[in-house]
Image (cartoon, rainbow, N blue to C red):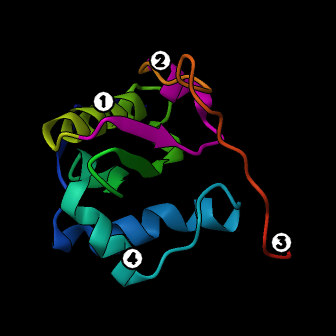
Amino acid sequence: MVSYPVTFRAAEIKDLPGVLELIGPFVVARQLLPRTREELQKLFEHGFVADCDQQLVAFCAIEIYSAKLAEIQCLAVAPSQQNRGIGKSLVERCILRARQEGVCELMAITASENVFQQCGFDYSLPDQKRALFIRLDDR
Protein backbone atom coordinates (compact mmCIF):
# COMPACT_ATOMS: atom_id res chain seq x y z
CA MET A 1 0.00 0.00 0.00
CA VAL A 2 1.31 3.44 -0.91
CA SER A 3 1.45 5.86 2.02
CA TYR A 4 0.54 9.30 0.72
CA PRO A 5 1.42 12.44 2.69
CA VAL A 6 -1.27 13.82 4.95
CA THR A 7 -2.29 17.47 5.06
CA PHE A 8 -4.17 19.05 7.95
CA ARG A 9 -6.45 22.06 7.71
CA ALA A 10 -9.44 23.76 9.28
CA ALA A 11 -12.75 22.10 8.46
CA GLU A 12 -14.88 23.87 5.85
CA ILE A 13 -18.57 23.57 4.98
CA LYS A 14 -17.63 21.76 1.76
CA ASP A 15 -16.25 18.95 3.98
CA LEU A 16 -19.64 18.16 5.54
CA PRO A 17 -20.62 15.30 3.17
CA GLY A 18 -17.19 13.70 3.55
CA VAL A 19 -17.24 14.00 7.34
CA LEU A 20 -20.73 12.48 7.49
CA GLU A 21 -19.52 9.58 5.36
CA LEU A 22 -16.39 9.19 7.49
CA ILE A 23 -18.17 9.09 10.85
CA GLY A 24 -21.09 6.90 9.67
CA PRO A 25 -19.44 3.53 10.39
CA PHE A 26 -18.23 4.78 13.79
CA VAL A 27 -21.79 5.81 14.68
CA VAL A 28 -23.14 2.41 13.59
CA ALA A 29 -20.46 0.72 15.74
CA ARG A 30 -21.51 3.04 18.62
CA GLN A 31 -18.00 4.47 18.85
CA LEU A 32 -19.30 7.97 18.09
CA LEU A 33 -22.57 9.67 18.91
CA PRO A 34 -24.99 10.23 16.04
CA ARG A 35 -25.13 13.86 14.93
CA THR A 36 -27.41 15.79 12.63
CA ARG A 37 -25.93 17.79 9.76
CA GLU A 38 -26.61 20.94 11.77
CA GLU A 39 -24.86 19.63 14.90
CA LEU A 40 -21.86 18.54 12.88
CA GLN A 41 -21.72 21.81 10.96
CA LYS A 42 -21.63 23.71 14.27
CA LEU A 43 -18.49 21.76 15.24
CA PHE A 44 -16.75 23.01 12.10
CA GLU A 45 -16.12 26.37 13.80
CA HIS A 46 -13.35 24.68 15.80
CA GLY A 47 -12.88 21.56 13.66
CA PHE A 48 -10.01 20.10 11.68
CA VAL A 49 -9.72 17.57 8.89
CA ALA A 50 -6.91 15.51 7.43
CA ASP A 51 -6.64 14.87 3.71
CA CYS A 52 -4.61 12.13 2.06
CA ASP A 53 -4.38 11.71 -1.72
CA GLN A 54 -7.18 14.29 -2.11
CA GLN A 55 -9.51 12.27 0.16
CA LEU A 56 -10.84 13.39 3.54
CA VAL A 57 -9.53 10.74 5.94
CA ALA A 58 -10.03 12.19 9.44
CA PHE A 59 -11.97 14.74 11.47
CA CYS A 60 -11.87 16.12 14.99
CA ALA A 61 -13.30 19.22 16.68
CA ILE A 62 -13.73 20.98 19.98
CA GLU A 63 -16.95 22.30 21.42
CA ILE A 64 -16.38 25.21 23.77
CA TYR A 65 -18.87 25.22 26.64
CA SER A 66 -17.42 28.18 28.57
CA ALA A 67 -14.15 30.00 29.17
CA LYS A 68 -13.37 27.23 31.61
CA LEU A 69 -14.32 24.07 29.73
CA ALA A 70 -14.28 22.59 26.23
CA GLU A 71 -14.60 19.05 24.91
CA ILE A 72 -12.83 17.29 22.07
CA GLN A 73 -15.52 15.60 20.01
CA CYS A 74 -15.96 13.38 17.03
CA LEU A 75 -12.40 12.10 16.53
CA ALA A 76 -12.61 9.79 13.54
CA VAL A 77 -9.83 8.42 11.35
CA ALA A 78 -10.55 6.23 8.32
CA PRO A 79 -9.56 2.63 9.13
CA SER A 80 -7.10 2.58 6.21
CA GLN A 81 -5.28 5.56 7.72
CA GLN A 82 -5.16 4.54 11.38
CA ASN A 83 -1.86 4.07 13.23
CA ARG A 84 -0.16 6.83 11.23
CA GLY A 85 -0.39 9.51 13.94
CA ILE A 86 -3.25 11.33 12.21
CA GLY A 87 -5.59 11.17 15.21
CA LYS A 88 -2.86 12.42 17.52
CA SER A 89 -2.09 15.32 15.17
CA LEU A 90 -5.76 16.32 15.09
CA VAL A 91 -6.01 16.15 18.89
CA GLU A 92 -2.89 18.34 19.15
CA ARG A 93 -4.51 20.89 16.83
CA CYS A 94 -7.64 20.88 19.00
CA ILE A 95 -5.53 21.42 22.13
CA LEU A 96 -3.81 24.37 20.47
CA ARG A 97 -7.16 25.86 19.39
CA ALA A 98 -8.53 25.51 22.95
CA ARG A 99 -5.45 27.32 24.29
CA GLN A 100 -5.85 30.06 21.69
CA GLU A 101 -9.48 30.47 22.78
CA GLY A 102 -8.42 30.80 26.44
CA VAL A 103 -10.04 27.57 27.61
CA CYS A 104 -8.78 26.37 31.02
CA GLU A 105 -9.74 22.68 30.84
CA LEU A 106 -10.23 20.36 27.89
CA MET A 107 -11.93 16.99 28.24
CA ALA A 108 -12.51 14.00 26.00
CA ILE A 109 -14.99 11.15 26.37
CA THR A 110 -13.52 8.36 24.29
CA ALA A 111 -12.93 4.67 23.78
CA SER A 112 -9.54 5.53 22.23
CA GLU A 113 -7.75 6.70 25.34
CA ASN A 114 -4.23 5.93 24.04
CA VAL A 115 -4.33 8.80 21.56
CA PHE A 116 -5.46 11.21 24.26
CA GLN A 117 -2.97 9.97 26.84
CA GLN A 118 -0.17 10.51 24.30
CA CYS A 119 -1.31 14.13 24.15
CA GLY A 120 -1.23 14.61 27.94
CA PHE A 121 -4.79 13.69 28.94
CA ASP A 122 -5.34 11.76 32.17
CA TYR A 123 -8.38 10.29 33.90
CA SER A 124 -8.58 13.21 36.31
CA LEU A 125 -6.80 16.46 36.97
CA PRO A 126 -4.44 16.42 39.95
CA ASP A 127 -6.37 17.16 43.16
CA GLN A 128 -9.58 17.61 41.16
CA LYS A 129 -12.99 15.98 40.90
CA ARG A 130 -13.56 12.97 38.68
CA ALA A 131 -16.24 12.74 36.00
CA LEU A 132 -19.07 10.27 36.64
CA PHE A 133 -21.61 9.13 34.06
CA ILE A 134 -25.06 7.55 33.92
CA ARG A 135 -26.73 6.17 30.79
CA LEU A 136 -30.19 7.67 30.30
CA ASP A 137 -31.26 5.97 27.10
CA ASP A 138 -32.14 2.33 26.49
CA ARG A 139 -29.19 1.48 24.24
Q: Tag on residue 118?
A: 2
Q: Where is residue 79 in the image (x, y as percent from the top left)?
A: 54, 44
Labels 1 and 4: the sequence-earlier one: 4
Residues under labels 1 and 3: Cα distance?
Answer: 32 Å
Q: Mark 4 points at which residue?
A: 39
Residue hosting label 1: 92
Counting from the top left corner in percent of width and height, residue 44 is at 25, 64
Q: Please tell me which residue lies in front, 86 or 118.
A: 118
The local crowd at label 1, few if under 14, some if 14 to 19, many if 20 or more residues have their Cα within 10 Å, is: some
Q: Going from the N terminus, do you reach mark 1 or mark 3 first?
A: 1
Q: How far apart are marks 3 and 2 (CA)?
A: 30 Å
Residue name at image x 21 percent, y 32 percent:
96
Residue 5, image quadrant: top left
**In the image, what residue type sits under mark 2?**
Gln
What residue did someone put label 3 on? 139
Q: Earlier in the sequence, mark 2 or mark 4?
A: 4
- Which element type, helix, strand or loop, lies under badge 1? helix
Q: Give the range drawn in magenta.
A: 103-118
